[in-house]
Image: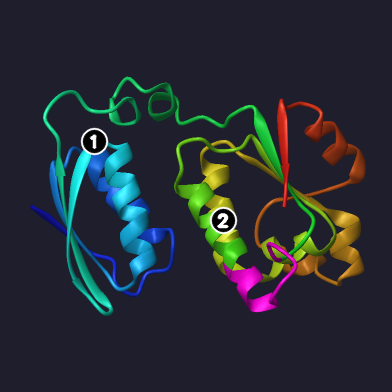
Amino acid sequence: MKEIDARGLACPQPVILTKKAMQAGEKALSVRVDNAAAVENLKRLADSQGYTAAVAGGEGDFTLDLTAKDGPAPAALTPESPARETGKAGDWAVFVGRDIIGAGDQELGGNLMRMYFYTLAQGEDIPAAVLFMNDGVKLPARDEQVADHLRSLQERGTRVLVCGTCLNFYGLTDQLKTGLVSNMYDIVTEMGRYGKVISL
């Protein structure tokens, strides 16, 4: 049985680590987490991927024993899955106009944005482009975690365009860690190329 110690890891890392083990063919896993939200997320993952889940422990130390059910693997795990086979960028883009997600607490919003890009970079369905404007340009310029996730996406074919006017306005032109310095024309043109644009 493969053991995964995901205690202390922020959402969605426990789910991503577990899903990778499932995709690698592990039929039995023992996953340790430290909060009830992670337990529920892992139970949903297990159900969606054809695994049973038995939960033990509590109060900051939970163990989930996940076992693959008999029968064929769900479509999401089969080697023939087109998304896993190609690993290519999809027909969609992400437009980032802020350096946080939501309108609440700044620290929480920043953490959510980092987790968004971490999850995006770990996924199979990745965007063809990520476009940064206004406050959003602070992420590839100032946030090393986001920059690392963007580099991972770029290695898989995602284009990262960063508004040069916005970088100049915030005095960040020389601090850009990754991505191409771009302009309004290029960003608008890029948006028009895809079937879907998600705005953060």
Residue hosting label 2: 116
Estimate the x, y position of residue 158 in percent, counting from the top left.
61, 39
Q: Determine whether, in the image, residue 200 is placed left or right of residue 166.
A: left
**Label 1: how many Cα within 10 Å (few below 14, some 14–19, many 20+):** many
**Label 2: how many Cα within 10 Å (few below 14, some 14–19, many 20+):** some
Residue hosting label 1: 50
Estimate the x, y position of residue 125 in percent, counting from the top left.
51, 35
- Which amino acid lies under the numbered mark 2 shown in the image of this protein? Tyr
Q: Residue at x 57, y 36 (%)?
A: 157
- Tell whether position 103 is magenta: yes
Q: Secondary structure at mark 1?
A: loop
Estimate the x, y position of residue 145 in percent, counting from the top left.
55, 66
- Tell whether position 132 is magenta: no
Which quadrant of the view contains residue 111? bottom right
Q: Residue at x 86, y 55 (%)?
A: 164
Estimate the x, y position of residue 5 in percent, counting from the top left.
23, 67
Q: Residue at x 29, y 37 (%)?
A: 49
**From which residue to which does the magenta span run?**
100-111
